[in-house]
Image (spheres, helix red, strand yellow):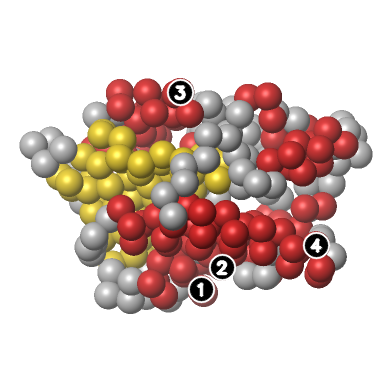
């Protein structure tokens, strides 16, 4: 990970931790992730989240899988304090994902809106594949569509936005078999695109999207609940602000 890209000022971790539990995006993404994990991965015991931030996703995993061993790794130590407070039973550490060296250790590894921040994303994917046990699963979400690139991505310190074929090919090159892929935040994509068009260099507030009116936050979450119903019915969206991919490691690979 390049150290000149700092996604958040130290104080922003506190703002993030305070906002996540009530914000439509984080709540909706958790619902999508937990459904996708339940639908595509049967049982697991050891779950690692790379780039766990303040631990919001990991807390959702703890609620859904109370008997699982949870591990969290985060490049920025400032987020780990909040993660540890959220899930005292999980084990946390500071880690640069390009240096992950474990072998066949975890049943599931999650990287949720993380690898788009990393220049050496293929090296990270190879490391994650190696750290999975045989038949283990990798669950990834990333921002999607290069044409959606805007000043918002620059403020978020993204290196890239992905296209589906690119992510699928990189995961395959890491030695994993892609099992499930879909876009999400699809119904809201036009609104998201318009919001990005309005963002201007020098005027964009990185925390603006966290300060929504109550009714708008509620409405956006309702739309995402409808989208989740469609996902559960088997719809796989071809376009969307985000991309979800689940891949598994062949039982013969170590």
In this image, 141 relative to 168: left or right?
right
Residue annotated with mark 4? 216
Q: Is residue 7 above or below residue 238?
A: below
Residue in front for this viewpoint, 41 or 102: 41
Residue in front for this viewpoint, 222 or 52: 222
Residue in front for this viewpoint, 164 or 253: 164
Disc with the residue nearer the chain's start (3 vs 1): 1
Residue at 24%, 60% in the rendered image: 42
Disc with the residue nearer the chain's start (2 vs 4): 2
Q: In this view, does 219 lie above or below 102?
A: below
Front of the two marks 3 and 1? 3
Residue at 21%, 40% in the rendered image: 249
Residue at 26%, 33% in the rendered image: 176
Front of the two marks 4 and 1? 4
Residue 86's disc number: 1
In this image, 216 relative to 43: left or right?
right
Residue annotated with mark 2? 82
Query: In the rendered picture of this protein, how many numbered marks are placed on residues?
Result: 4
**Mark 2, other Cα within 10 Å: few <14 / some 14–19 / many ≥20:** many
């Amino acid at each position: 990970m390049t150290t000149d890209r700092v996604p958040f000022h130290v104080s922003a971790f506190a703002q993030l931790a305070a906002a996540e539990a009530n914000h439509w995006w984080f709540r909706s993404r958790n619902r999508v992730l937990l459904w996708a994990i339940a639908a595509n991965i049967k049982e697991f015991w050891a779950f690692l989240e790379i780039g766990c931030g303040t631990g919001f996703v990991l807390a959702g995993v703890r609620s859904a899988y109370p008997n699982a061993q949870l591990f969290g790794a985060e490049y920025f130590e400032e987020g780990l304090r909040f993660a540890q407070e959220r899930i005292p039973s999980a084990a946390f550490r500071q880690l640069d994902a390009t240096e992950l060296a474990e072998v066949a250790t975890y049943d599931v590894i999650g990287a949720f809106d993380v690898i788009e921040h990393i220049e050496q994303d293929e090296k990270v994917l190879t490391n994650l594949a190696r750290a999975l046990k045989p038949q283990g699963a990798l669950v990834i979400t990333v921002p999607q569509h290069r044409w959606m690139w805007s000043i918002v991505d620059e403020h978020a310190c993204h290196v890239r936005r992905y296209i589906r074929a690119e992510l699928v090919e990189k995961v395959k090159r890491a030695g994993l078999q892609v099992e499930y892929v879909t876009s999400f935040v699809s119904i809201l994509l036009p609104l998201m695109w318009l919001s990005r068009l309005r963002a201007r260099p020098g005027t964009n507030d990185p925390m603006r999207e966290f300060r929504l009116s109550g009714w708008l936050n509620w409405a956006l979450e309702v739309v995402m609940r409808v989208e989740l119903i469609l996902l559960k019915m088997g719809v796989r969206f071809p376009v969307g602000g985000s991309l979800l991919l689940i891949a598994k490691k062949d039982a013969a690979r170590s």
